[in-house]
Amino acid sequence: MDLKLTPVSMPTSIRPSTGIKPGGASSASGVGGGFSGELKSALGAVSAAQNESGRLQREVQLENPKVSLEETMVAIQKAQIGFQATLHVRNRMVQAYTDIMNMQV
């Protein structure tokens, strides 16, 4: 079993440099696009993990000898954890929006 850390699942303290300097503002039209670019990238990674786990599940159900049950279970857990993290981020963003909208000016 080969488990690799991708930049999305890797702790920020050991991530490789992304080319964006801390404290410097990157343009929204540039690669990544700041927060929205990172959010789209993270959602794409979660979607890819879910697609991969679905593919592996189908392969196990079709009794493909090249796909192991362990590999499938790890992929399912990765997809589930990614989805839960995405759900928590969404809930926090909705709560922050609601708090800002309820502020009196």
Image: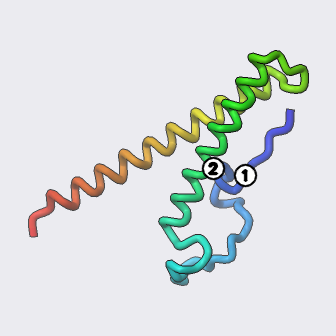
The type of residue carrying mark 1 is Thr
Task: Tell me the SS state at disc 1.
Answer: loop
User: Residue at image x 57%, y 41%?
Assistant: 82
The three-letter code of the residue at mark 2 reads Ala
Please tell me how crowded label 1 is: few (under 14), some (14-19), or many (20+) other residues with Cα within 10 Å.
Answer: few
Tell me the quadrant of the picture where the N terminus can be found.
Answer: top right
In the depicted structure, whether residue 61 falls above or below residue 66:
above
Residue 3, given in percent of the width and then of the height, sits at 80, 40
Q: Which residue is denoted by mark 2 in the rendering?
A: 45
Q: Whole-Å distance between the Cαs marked 1 and 2?
A: 10 Å
> Which of these two is toward me, 64 or 73?
64
Left or right: 95 in relation to 30: left
| Quarter holding residue 13 | bottom right
Task: Give yes or no for contact between labels 1 and 2 (Cβ–Cβ under 8 Å).
Answer: yes
Q: Quadrant of residue 104?
A: bottom left
List the residue tagged with mark 1: 6
Name the spot of residue 23 as percent of width and height, x first: 53, 80
Q: Helix or strand or loop: what does disc 2 sit on?
A: helix
Q: Which mark is residue 42?
A: none
Residue 75 vs residue 91: left or right?
Answer: right
Where residue 98 appears, x then y in whole percent? Answer: 23, 53
Residue visible at 90% across and 26% down? 66
Please give the name of the residue rendered at 55% of the width and 62% of the height, measured from the top-left corner. 38
